[in-house]
Image (cartoon, coloured by chain):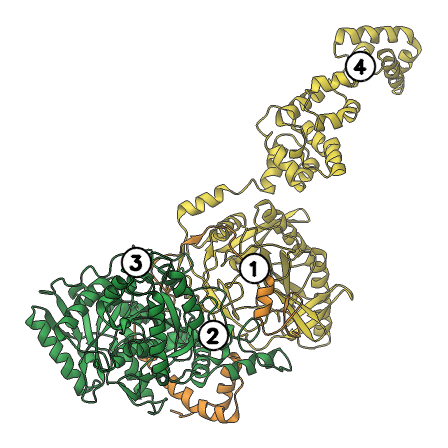
Amino acid sequence: MKDKLSREELLHVAELARIELTEEEIEKYQIHIKKLLDDVEKIKDVEGYDEEQLIAPWSENTHLREDKIGEMYDPKEVINRAPKHSGNYIEVPVVVGESEGA
Amino acid sequence: MSNYIPTIGVEVHLELKTKTKIFSPSENGYGKMANSLTNEIDLGYPGTLPTLNEEVINIGIKAATILNCKIRKVMHFDRKNYFYPDNPKNYQITQDRTPIGYDGYVEIEVNGEKKKIEIKEMHIEEDTCKSAHRGNKTLLDFNRAGVPLLEIVTKPCISSSEEAKLYLEKLRELLTYGDISDCKIEEGSMRAEPNVSLRKKEEDPFGTKVEIKNIGSISNVVAGIEKEIERQTKLYDQGQEIVPQTRRYDDKIQNTVLMRVKETGNDYRYFPEPDIPFVVLTDEMIEEAVKEIPMLPDERRRIYQELGVSKLNANKLVQNRPLSDYFNELLGEKINHQTASNLLLGDISAYLNRNEKDIKETTLTKERFIELVNLIDNNTLTSKNLKEIIIPLLEEEKTIQEIMKDNNIENITDDTEIRKIIRKVIEENKDSVEDYKNGHERAIKFLMGQIMKETKGKANPKMTMDILQEELK
Amino acid sequence: MRYLNLPLVEINKLLKEKKIKPIDLVNEAYENIEKHKEYNAYITLNKEDAIRQAKELENKEVDNLFFGIPIAVKDNIVTKGLRTTAASHILDNFIPPYDATVVEKIKERNMIIIGKTNMDEFAMGSSSRTSYFGPPKNPWNKNKISGGTSGGSATTIALRDVPIALGSDTGGSIRQPSAYTGIVGLKPTYGRVSRYGLIAYASSFDQIGAMTRNVYENALLLNTIVGHDDKDLTSSKKENEDFTRLIGESVKGKKIAIPKFFVSEIVSKDILDNIKQVVKILEENGVIVDYIDMKYVENTVTLYQIIAMAEASSNLARYDGIRYGYSYEKPNNIDDLYVKTRANGFGEEVKKRIMVGSYLLSGENAKTYYNKALSIRDDIRKEFKRVLNDYDWIMGPTTATTAYDLDDPMDDPSKSFLDDVLVMPANMTGLPGINVPIGFGKDNMPIGLHIMGDSFEEAKLYQIASFIEKELKLDLNPWKGEENE
């Protein structure tokens, strides 16, 4: 078993997590994360698992909310809490293209 | 014309007609001041949790029923993880593994032939916030964050831009009728994203899929698909490969442009949303929801035609939801439904359009309308008369009889009196009678004119003509 | 006179008789905290507001037992208008515009929030040493950890600064520091207390609970914070009840199971001796104690890590420097804003867990790890339910050793395994668990007993815990009364 996560693997998860790493951190995490992952590998030895089984996070069913409008924030309050704003909008550096989702 | 077979699938996002957002009690509204429709849940503040709007589930059941989908009775939500400024939690709550509806279809008519556009699945999820790009910054308005969406995904079973158009039109008609969504493409409450691939022969595997986003109208969906087929055909002809990518339709240049090349497998890290336990739909819930579905367009058209309404009129009625709903209240009445449809689509429609009114805002109650249809049908009122009294009919509370009196309409419907006058005119115009009998059809019109002159226009034309023809035999 | 050292019932009596005012309690609490500053139990104090509130209460009727009582709240529980950081730089300027549901509840009873207690950053850790604000210190020995992640709440209760505190427990975070500091801490059944406003670490484990000086007051405090909440879909519809109602009832004929693994060689001799002592007392009083084999108990840490880190990677994605909190000042572009805000804003342990969690959900891994872990978790739940069909309680030590040194290495995996393994099953199964102090080790550090019960049987946990507490009659004030004047 390797004792280090490859640099590429580590940088891939850092990219997924949107965390910038210094060279020093890369060195450190390659070892630390590998240790954690080795531990996690033990799950592969545990038997009795149905892949198609759907797991409810908890046992009681969801209760539904009535479609009734509740309290909302003053826009001023919302934008003032944001690190950057412009007019009534929250501001970020320009984003090219459209959302991945929806 | 392309030498390749196009395969098209369409993804449609619809904003649902609810009062509040899907996972929070903030208002689901359009066109309000930026960032005025939010609370801590919509903004993804720490420690907040989603709740689930019952109306979204209700509408989901209705939509699934309307699109002939099977309904998943036990479902959960999943998190789709990706970073984007319009995505407040940097994950979107959606349904990945258990969409509320699946295996449905929408029937369209292509060149007179029926075709089923198959629906793979439909699921509910939350909308992102709205972003506007200004120079080197992007401005975010979270009013739309958390608005309930329904995503409807077809199988890759559409073979032309025309079919895609018919599918979208049909979908819009059905879902507007079902009170699912406003389906306004211009306002973004309906968003259609086609994907296109080409292949040489039916037996070949599907070609490389290219998605087209940002399309502002159904006609641009058609244009976008056609441009994409053109582009891919050219590339294939030149022996080039198609790169999987997302393009957008640019209305200015009327063509698609590259947005981004698909990264190898978007890693959305889906997993079941731990904050929302299973949603279990009971038979009662489903029954209740289905009961709320109004009569749908195809059924309306069929019933109207069975009642003697022309195909043209039936179609026109269905295109006008308020009139069609009004008409539906008359389905069980013993009236001439064709006459009724003519009335609604003719002078009444003209009046409503002119005055930008809904028929429910007029004084034309169901009872008055039935009376009116019968008066026209038994020739008591002429179409000329109707034009004269249309305003009081729709604006005043008086009875039709009173309105007729006010306008001096006293049609001669007594056939012995009309017969008397007809005989007199025949007596006085022997030459014309002779002409008519010799085959000069036009002579009868002259005779009619003379009769109308005698009666000062009060004789019912149809009845008069019938008696005149009888007398001339 | 130190009023805050008195039992709650007596403080309440004095308030009712107008012999003292809420402001006296508040002043005393802040004097205590000032005196114990070096223990670093608090991240943010609520002094101005607490004093204002105490004065307002002077004109109000003392209508419940908690009226005017100072309370400490863990800093991952959101408080309106009071900075809430989760011990992270990324939230160190965050002043929430809303209250957690539990905070609404304690405010309804006119408890006075004294301050926000120190903890591991985003509740990730087990010694409160991952706090951006430095670790709290153990009241029994300043060189030792207070445990975690609710280390600050445990510290301030053990120090007798305030009589009651709220903590949260994802993998033992209430019970383990309670054991290390000699106080009583209970993690309720998952769903018993609303999670609305609890800054999420691992959604399917997190639960808020009470941390107090003794069992009775723990039950009293739990009475005030439970209940179904429409804002939390995972909160249970279970009826509220009086959790003190079984305290004092006989335990004769009841049955306790001790999984053999819980008293195996992983646990220090000191602690095993103390456990044996308790077992003896129980047996003398007619309780049946059996040592049993249980499946899965060794696997729980692995499963916990998978589920917790996967959920955490998603739960912590929202901290991006856009809508609130710390934000990198001069980003070149949007991606720069993300990666630098999160690189600077999160501490080492949090970054590690987010990255591992992202890995575990990435591509096919979600199936191999997360879904599989959820499925096995279901089996573990069934295994514990099976045992609890035959036994009233499942018992073991809360920790494998007593509190260790503050400067012990942080990233020793075997240590973090031992930190969690004995208390984790309660989170894996959603069952309630309580720590009750049972003595001291040779190092003079407190030792805790861990008892688990069936779902929603907190009252029964208090019954047995209170019985043991009364039998042992331990003096759990680190000052042994010497500081009392």
Residue B153's mark?
1
The chain letter for the residue carrying disc 3 is: C
Across and down, in percent, residue B222 comes to 71, 59
Same chain shared by disc 4 and disc 2: no
First in sequence: mark 4 vs mark 1: 1
Q: In this view, does B204 lie to the left or right of C20?
A: right
Which of these two is toward me, C172 or C302? C172
Say whether mark 3 and mark 1 are on the same chain: no
- Labels 1, 2: one chain: no
- Determine which residue is flagged by label 4: B459
Residue beneath the point at 66% across and 66% down: B212
Q: What element carries label 3?
A: loop
Q: Read off the chain for label 1.
A: B
Q: Which amino acid does label 1 sit on?
A: Val
In this view, the mark in front (1 or 3): 3
Amino acid on which disc 2 is placed:
Leu
Front of the two marks 1 and 2: 2
For label 2, the crowd category at 10 Å Cα-Cα, with few meaning under 14, some 14 to 19 and many 20 or more, is: many
Image colour assigned to chain C: green
* The label number, if any, that marks residue C316 in the structure image: 2
Which of the pair B448/C179 is nearer the observer?
Answer: C179
